[in-house]
Image (cartoon, rainbow, N blue to C red):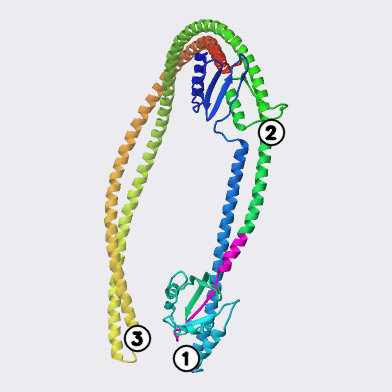
Amino acid sequence: MMAMCGARSAKKRRTDSRLMGVPCQVKHQYQYLLTGHIFSWNNDGHNKTVVAARGNAMTVKKQLLAQLAAMLLGVVLMAGWGLYNLYTSLVEAHRETVTEQAQGAVSIIRAYEDAARSGTLPVAEAQARAKAALLASRFGEDGYFYLLDDKLNFIAHPIKPKLAGTSMYALKTPDGKNLGEIFAAAMAANDVARYDWPKPGADAPVGKMSMNLKSGDWGWVVGTGIYIDEISGDVLSHAFEQGGVLAVLALLLGALGVMISRNILRVLGGEPAYARDVVGEVAAGRLYTEVKLQPGDRDSLLAGIAQMQARLRETVGAVAGHARVLNERAEVLDVSVSRVAERSGEQSSAATSMAAAIEEMTQGIAQISGSAEQAQALGVRSGEFSREGGAVVRGAVDEMREINKTVDAAAGSLSSLVNDVAGISSIVAVIREIADQTNLLALNAAIEAARAGETGRGFAVVADEVRKLAERTSGATGEIVVKIGHIQQLSDSTREAMLEAVGKVATGVELADKGREAIDRIEESSGTVQGAVKDISGSLREQSAASAEIATHVEQIAASAGDNAAAAREAAQAAAAMRELSGALRQSVAHFQLN
């Protein structure tokens, strides 16, 4: 029994890394530790029950209450944040109020400063009126304004006139701070001054906020302040209201938590930790474990787990029996199929060897036949080429003769061209001589026109134009002479090249005639060779067809033998796989312990 307990513990440690179990008792109880849970199996022969739950696990009720407490804490924090925001918003509102009042008072002072600057009022009268208007101003229940100079000395105070001439630095707050220093620091930062100061007629200091702004020309400092003790009262009032709401909410959440925990336990049939322990036993293969249910419980999660365990126990028992039978049948089938596979393999090997030999012979004949067919094709192509070559050579001979005629005609035309060019040169010489004479006549006409004076001026202009035209004609004829000389040189060179080409064309005609005779002889020999190759190729095709038919039949025999061998091997593999599957099925079923 100790060895079995140790084996189960080791198996559990392999399947669940969280198991840290060690045998504790040997006789009737075995306890293991799993994720903070302690399990014990009371072994009384056949009845083994999961007893324990987690040592440090929280129950559903405790978990829900903890979550509700966390929610309530969050609500309290939100309420505290809201009160803080309320306090800051009220302080900011008072800051804006005192700032606006101080700015309004400064605008009054600046209006009188403008009147004094413009001369509407004398400075003394303007200051007196400004002081009176400021001291008479009020806002709220007890708000007023006071005047200081740029040294923070009191100029006037509506509530305490005796402070006139007193320095603000001489005043101290109840906690010993210098009021002048507080005001100076606030003015430097353009911010309000915050300090504690008793209300009129009271001794206890309360929070106060003052704003001091400096005017322009006179250097006066206008100040005012408001008490902010009512802010704390407003915040405290809201705190009491929210505290009452939170108390009611806490009661409601507590009642809701108790109700939800009861419903969850009724649906689960017990604590979730116990349900997880039972499922862990089933997963570990211990199907003999008894599930503890509440009396009359048939619909809870634990009841469903108990039914699943019972049906799984029956199914695993049946599967184990079928696995044993399947393994026996698979062993018998494996032996029979192995014999069939061995015989089929021998037959397939013999047929394959014979097919390979015939295939080699067929390939040899096919190669010879292919070579003969290639030779026949080459003979046919050679005959075609020779015929085409003969036709081409005959056409070339005819073309050569036509070229010879054309070249002769071109040579005659070129000689005529040379003679015509020589005639053009003589004509150009005559034109040039006429241009020179015209130029001379125009010069004489210009001289005569100059002698005639005003009467011959128009004639002189015409004579000058005629002279210019004669000069241009003479220049053009000179260029024509140059071009004609160049043309004569090219014509002479071309005539010589043409005469040389006539001789070469005649030689080419003779060679083409000889080539045509040689190609005619090749064409006759090619026809004879083509007939012989055609006869050889036909014989080889007949022999190749017979060999191919024999090879086809042998390949069919080899393929049939190979198919039989492959089928036998597949059957053997299937039998082996069936045997392995039955073994794996038996091992899987062996994981479950039915008793």
Q: Pinpoint residue 424: horizontal percent, then vertical percent.
A: 31, 63
* Residue tagged 3: 459
> What's the distance in space between the residues labelled 3 and 2, CA to CA?
144 Å
The correct choice, above or below, for 306 with respect to 400 in the image is above
In this view, 353 is above or below 442: above
C-beta proximity under 8 Å, tags 2 and 1? no
Image quarter for residue 431? bottom left
Q: Which mark is residue 83?
A: none
**Circle 3 residues within 10 Å: few <14, some 14–19, many ≥20:** some
Mark before the other along the chain sequence, 3 or 2: 2
Please name the residue that numbered disc 1 is placed on: 117
User: Label 2, on which residue?
Assistant: 266
Amino acid carrying label 2: it is Arg
Q: Name which quarter of the figure residue 281 lies in.
A: top right
Tell me the SS state at disc 1.
helix
Q: Which residue is located at x 27 percent, y 49 percent?
A: 496
Front residue of this view, candidates 368 and 115:
115
Q: Amino acid at mark 1?
A: Arg
**Split into 4 quadrants, where in the image is the C terminus?**
top right
Single out the mark in the foreground, 2 or 1. 2
Q: Secondary structure at mark 3?
A: helix
